[in-house]
Image (cartoon, grey):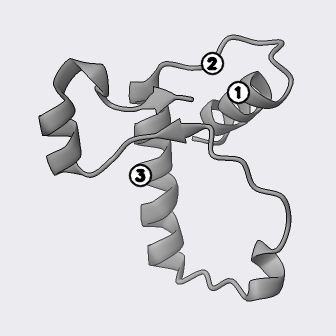
Amino acid sequence: MVPVLSQATASVCSGGSPPPHSDRVAAALLTAEKAARREKQGYTMDHLIGSWRLCWISGTRRTQQQAGPLLGAGRYL
């Protein structure tokens, strides 16, 4: 999970490595989300303050169905 997300971050931020396939990113994000819910991790606003950049989108299942192959499992911006 973490290596896939780290690779995705590195590819977007530095552009030095190729990004992992969207299917792998989606699976890693779902795993991370489930783990956070299971561990009941909480974040305060102080944890979230900073510079953010949207690099990858997946959409809802309905959006994925409507977009079809254009969006697939996700898409790098």
* Quadrant of the frame with the N terminus: top right
For badge 3, the amino acid type reads: Leu
Residue of label 1: 7
Q: CA distance from mark 2 to mark 1?
A: 6 Å
Residue 5: image location, x then y, percent: 64, 38
For badge 1, the amino acid type reads: Gln
CB contact under 8 Å: marks 2 and 1? yes
* Quadrant of the frame with the C terminus: top right
- Give the SS element for disc 3: helix
Q: CA distance from mark 3 to mark 1?
A: 16 Å
Residue of label 2: 19
- The count of marks equals 3
Residue 17: image location, x then y, percent: 76, 12
Q: Earlier in the sequence, mark 2 or mark 3?
A: 2
- Residue at coordinates 75% horizontally, 86% vertically from top-left? 45
Q: CA distance from mark 2 to mark 3?
A: 18 Å
Residue 11: image location, x then y, percent: 74, 22
Q: Earlier in the sequence, mark 3 or mark 1?
A: 1
- Give the SS element for disc 1: helix
Could you classify mark 1 by the number of other residues whose Cα lies within 10 Å: few (under 14), some (14-19), or many (20 or more)? some
Q: Earlier in the sequence, mark 2 or mark 1?
A: 1
Between 32 and 13, the one lying in front of the other is 13
Could you classify mark 2 by the number of other residues whose Cα lies within 10 Å: few (under 14), some (14-19), or many (20 or more)? some
- Residue at coordinates 21% horizontally, 45% vertically from top-left? 63
Q: Residue 41 vs residue 64: left or right?
A: right
- Residue at coordinates 75% horizontally, 55% vertically from top-left? 52
Residue of label 3: 30
Up-down relation of residue 77 to residue 61 (above or below): above
